[in-house]
Image (tube, grey):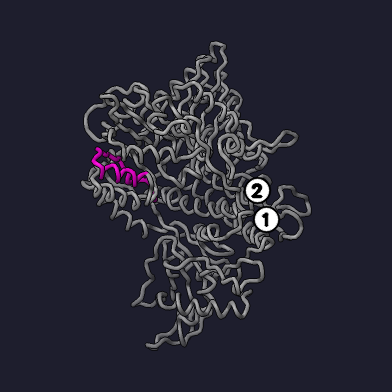
Amino acid sequence: MEAPHSPDLQGPPDVPPVDPTAGDPLSSETTAEQPTPRLNQTRTGIKPRALPDPQADLTDPSLYFNRELSHLQFNVRVLEQALDAAHPLLNRLMFLLIFSSNMDEFFEIRVAGLKNQVALGDDASGADGRSPRSVLAEISRIAHDQVARQYRILNEVLIPALEAHKLRFRRRDDWSDAQRAWVRDIVDAEIMPVVSPIGLDPSHPFPRLVNKSLNFIVELEGKDAFGREGGLAILPAPRSLPRVIALPAELCEEGFSEYVFLSSMIHAHAEEVFPGMTVHGCYQFRLTRNADFSVDPEEVSDLASALRGELLARRYGSGVRLEVASNCPDELARFLLAQFSLEEGDLYRVDGPVNLTRMMSVLGEVDRPELLYRPFTPGLPKPLGRKESLFAAIGAGDILLHHPFQAFSPVEELLREAARDADVLAIKQTLYRTGADSPIVNALVEAAGNGKEVTVVIELRARFDEADNLALASRLQEAGAIVIYGVMAYKTHAKMLHIVRRERGKLRHYAHLGTGNYHSRTARLYTDYSLLTARPGLCEDVHRVFQQLSGMGQTRRIETLLHAPFTLHERLVAMIEREAEHARRGRPAHLIVKCNSLTEPRLIQALYRASRAGVTCDLIIRGMCCLRPGIPGISETIRVRSIIGRFLEHTRVFHFHNDGKPETWCSSADFMARNMFHRVEIGFPLLEKKLAARVRKDLETYLVDNCQSWLLQPDGSYLKQQPGDEAPISAQETLLYAYATRA
């Protein structure tokens, strides 16, 4: 990535056109004559600060990076993948589109939250001491730079490269006569019957537009059928129509796959929507609204009903960002800003479609396997290949799966087997995110239909999955399962499955514990661990956690698991302190933490104390990291790296050397305050030494990655690691080779 002394995240001011015939247009090599917009040549969004005094109070704000700016930096590292020649071309496009999706959520939740703070006059700051207003200003500066850079990458790097591979997005001024005729037919048959223009006048005030919907503001001249003078109109794009449409093969240049945008089709035929009037301008725009909501536990008697109401409100929250076409006149842009009570800094001019995420559909349509990662068949541990029954295999010893390199199907098969096994009496499971037609849910429905005692704890408040989870709850209830919505003030984020089976006249317990969701699709895209176990201690603890979630009263002692919001945080701090004490006594001391985010101040302070004591701290933090590494006397033994690659890093693993008696834990929780204090989470130990050693080896593979690894610098920038004279090592490719079977 960038050099650590660089002060911000903006890209170079100009990106030269790319000649798709002149070798690899996305080569990481650069020259003074032909720079490319690579992030490792740009400046970081964190302002350089003087290094704190080695004796500084560990609550000193200078020791912490801002959470929201760190989150934004992760999104920019995702954007960087669009320029990484190690990824196939269509995967590079996918990363660019994921950046759009990530930024949508960032504005809907994080920026919206900061704006609410400012509106309420709340100047409360986080551990970094920055006010909400100053953070918003910094976000605006970085986001404007990076969104502009995103469209330059799309227009000047990816689209020419795709065209060189005979994939073309046709702009309307480049349509052939035959293509224009085809577009007209589509407009007449599919668009005109459903489009609803809205003229703006005293009887037609500005419409209430749905969050992130595609719209056009149209300048009109002339009189309409009622003699009203033209002015402005709003033209919402039909939400039922795809945003990118494939041209018929016979209309494409030979050997090409070609696409047109719905926005181009509407723009080209805007005058037909307003017959007898002259269209002087038609400009696309999109409003991003506040999509967060909260439910007050003291005012809600029925969580499901309350959420249904909030889901409707989410579509029309307050505005937080306005995107407009780059050629939209200033006066129209200001008019739109005024309608949504937004300021100039909330305006983003874009050189292309305002919702790039909708281009994701193309990736599923294009039959160009050579431009995508090669498929692979997830592997299976040997014990699963030797036993006919999963219960027999798990009963013989703990089984650990590392997704997506190893299959998620054994978890689904375990539930299917349990649903059909006459000896299985009860099944309990937590569901946070899962597919609408999930094999997991199908098995639970079948189990309930077969007379099993099925209890499912569904977290309705899983952000952006609330509607799906409400539907799941209804389906399971109709099948006869007991559905519980967890604890009102605490999200149930733990990933647990508990099965009770009668064997030889006694009851035996089985459990699945995971770091990720029970979702078949994400199990192919996210890295996660799954532990299948019949250990009495672990299974009994899982049983007790389920009893606590479904009943009331004080929990019985949980012996083996770590359990938020009760013991997880204090035990993690204690294990970090234990490692520090080993270092103070002159013993080797090392810890490895791998999770998605590190923001909780007391855990950060514990890591600072460990570093001061001499503990080697290797932190693999994919996204937000508020800890400042490499500060002499405070964090000089702490190294923080972020791995961004083909798969989304999602495993939460905590390894402690513990003076030669190592402990390795997996968890559903990140090092964040919400996970430690406001959610039901679990941490589970790997008690089988071979499995713990295997996970330690996996972690060491991440620590030597020099292809997809970014090192966090003391000033807050991230430095992309390069192989140099060393052999290139990609942790994800190494694990794929070790565990999976290539197709």
* Secondary structure found at label 2: loop
Q: Residue at x 36, y 31 (%)?
A: 511
At a point 32% along the width and 58% down the height, the residue shown is: 312
Query: Is 288 in front, or is 669?
Result: 669
Please report the residue visible at 66 percent of the width from the left and 67 percent of the height from the top.
255
Q: Is residue 109 left or right of residue 540?
A: right
Name the mark on residue 13.
1
Secondary structure type for disc 1: loop
Q: Is residue 233 visible?
A: yes
- Which residues fall within the magenta stretch? 440-464
Q: Position of residue 376 (x, y in %)?
A: 56, 44
- x then y, percent, for residue 270: 50, 78
Of residue 541 and residue 307, the one placed in the foreground of this image is: 541
Q: Which mark is residue 84?
A: 2
The single residue placed furthest to the top in the displayed view is: 585
Kind of residue at badge 2: Asp
How packed mark 2 is, by other alpha carbons closer than 10 Å (few <14, some 14-19, many 20 or more), is: some
